[in-house]
Every structure is written in structure tokens, then in C-alpha cells.
Amino acid sequence: MEAILKVEHLVKTFGTNEVLRDIDFSVYKGDVISIIGSSGSGKSTLLRCINMLEEATGGEILYHGKNILDGSVDEDRYRTKVGMVFQTFNLFNNYTVLDNCMIGQMKVLKRNRGDAEARAMEYLSRVGMEQYIKAKPRQLSGGQKQRVAIARALAMDPEILLFDEPTSALDPEMVGEVLDVMKNLAESGMTMLVVTHEMAFARDISKRVVYMADGKIEEEGPPSEIFGNPKSQRTKDFLSRFTKG
């Protein structure tokens, strides 16, 4: 089976600071991969390079075998296929929930209003936000905003969804509603790459877990292996903080 996405020898530096060092991994259809690690280990930068929000310093990112870093890729079109859900929602505050989920479809995918609305409603229903279509983001809780952001990303028909710490800006009581949506997506076969501090999600929902430290992949494997029998001492030390008590 061909990988949808392949990262090869990826490097990212900010000045003299090497944030990503020789990153290699592949994403296959139906994968749910959780990327875990301490703050500053390069997790979010990796996602931002994959989504072309940061320019990689070296290496390749292959989408269906084509290197997206060679300058020939239409970034907007690529981002419809490799969608991103951000920590801080990134909704348009002056638009309604429904319009937030329609504008990208109409501008980038050139869908007509009727088709865009039908698709938006389908996914807003799926994340339980169909009754809020006339609301503006300021009228919503953090968890509701994140569910709208997920619906907006889904409405673009992505092949892979990237999640950059999607629950870390939420109040604790709202984390569950977003994780439930993500769990349902994973169970429906959506290909997902998730940077997260939610260890239960990484352990119970992922097919693979990638542990990053100091800008490189320290260890990766099935959750049973990473959580049950990690090979690296650094992985053990990191996970011991979450399993105490």
C-alpha cells in the first residue's frame, strides 16, 4: 500500500536552533497517529511544515509521491486535502457558524452556495453543532468553537486531518466533547495525525504513537508497545509522569 504522506529526512531550523532533526515517518489511509512529547520537542512545528505553514529547511514531504516542497504545489489546494485543526480554532469572528464552514468550499473548491451549505450542514450535524448555524464564534464555548473548526475542515473533503493540540486551549469540562468527535472520526476511518497531551486518547484511539524529544523521533510504534513496553529510557521517563497516581 502506498503511503498518502511520507516525511523523509525533514529538517527545520530557526536561526541556529534546529527544531526538527532528520524526521522520517509515513502516513497510510486510515492511520490515526498521535504525536506526543514535551513542549518544545518540535511536534507542532512538524505539523506546520506538513501543512506548509512553515517552510522546511531540508528533506522532503511527499504527498502521493510528489514532493510538496519543490515549489510546484498550489498551497491552498493542497491544504484542502491535508486539512488542519488548530489549537486556537482560527474561526472568522464576523461570520456565522454556517458561513465559517462554507467560505473555504466556495473560494477554494469553487462549490456553489447550495452545495457548500449542504456539505457544511452535513458536518455540523456530525459534530453536534447544527442548531448553532446562525451563531457567531463569540457566542460559543471553546469546545463548541473547536467542533465548528473540525466541521469546517471536514467540509473541504480532506484526505488527512492534522490536529495541533486541539484540546489544550479548552476548559477541562469541554475537552471530552471534542475528544468524542475525534474518536468518532477515527472510528469512521478518517486518516488523522494528532499532536496531543491527552494520553488516554493516544493510548486508546491511536493506531500508532510517535514520541518526539529534542526535535527528533525518539520512538514510534503501536500504543500497546509505547505505553506498555517502551524501549527508550526517555519515553519511559516521559510516560511515567502521566501514569503516576
Image (tube, rainbow, N blue to C red):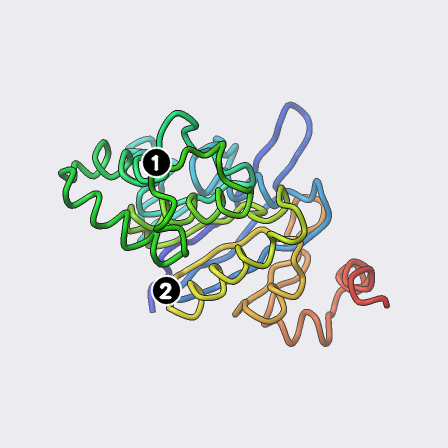
Disc on the earlier residue, 1 or 2: 2
Lateral position of residue 170 relative to residue 32, left or right: right
Lateral position of residue 61 relative to residue 80, left or right: right
Please provide percent x and percent y for residue 151. Answer: 37, 49
Residue occupied by mark 2: 29
Residue occupied by mark 1: 100
- The residue depicted at 76 percent of the width and 64 percent of the height is 232
Q: Nearer the viewer, residue 136 or 20?
A: 136
Lateral position of residue 118 relative to residue 123, left or right: left
Please provide percent x and percent y for residue 195. Answer: 58, 51
Q: Amino acid at mark 1?
A: Asn
- The residue depicted at 78 percent of the width and 58 percent of the height is 238
Q: Nearer the viewer, residue 112 or 132?
A: 132
Q: Residue placed farthest to the right in the image?
A: 245
Q: Amino acid at mark 2?
A: Lys
Q: Nearer the viewer, residue 31 or 184?
A: 184
**Can you say whether 10 is above or below 125 in the image?**
above
Q: Nearer the viewer, residue 91 or 21?
A: 91
**Can you say whether 31 is above or below 174 in the image?**
below
Query: Looking at the figure, which quarter contains the N terminus?
Result: bottom left
